[in-house]
Image (cartoon, grey):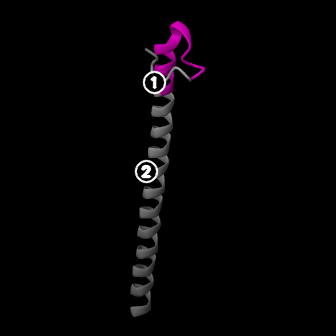
Amino acid sequence: MAKLYDYRAMDVGQHEGANQADRWRKRMRQGRRWRLSRNFVTWLLILVMIAISSTLIALNAYWRF
């Protein structure tokens, strides 16, 4: 009985499990990188919003006096 992933060139022979683990590891690394970059963009947007709002508050206080 043929396995489902016999067509992959990487999975030939006795190193099948190691290649599977390498693929999982690579996928985890890519996922972590994507998550970190998404986190960075989120924090960057939050900091930009804080900077803009505090600037507007400071200018509003300056214009009142």
Q: Residue at 45%, 33% (x, y): give it.
A: 28
Mark 1, residues whose alpha carbon is within 10 Å: few (<14), some, or many (≥20)?
few
Q: Tell me the amino acid under the disc marked 1.
A: Leu
Q: Is residue 39 visible?
A: yes
49 shown above or below 60: above
Give the position of the C terminus as an image quadrant. Answer: bottom left
Res 65 seen here: no
Distance from disc 1 to disc 2, alpha carbons, whole Å, reads 36 Å
Residue ID at (46%, 74%): 52
Q: Secondary structure at mark 1?
A: loop
Residue placed farthest to the right in the image? 9
Q: Nearer the viewer, residue 3 or 56?
A: 3
Q: Which residue is mark 2?
A: 39
SS label for mark 2: helix
From the viewer's side, name the closer residue of 55 and 14: 14
**x and y percentages locating residue 62 in the rendered image:** 43, 86
Pointer 1: what residue?
4
Magenta stretch bounds: 8-23
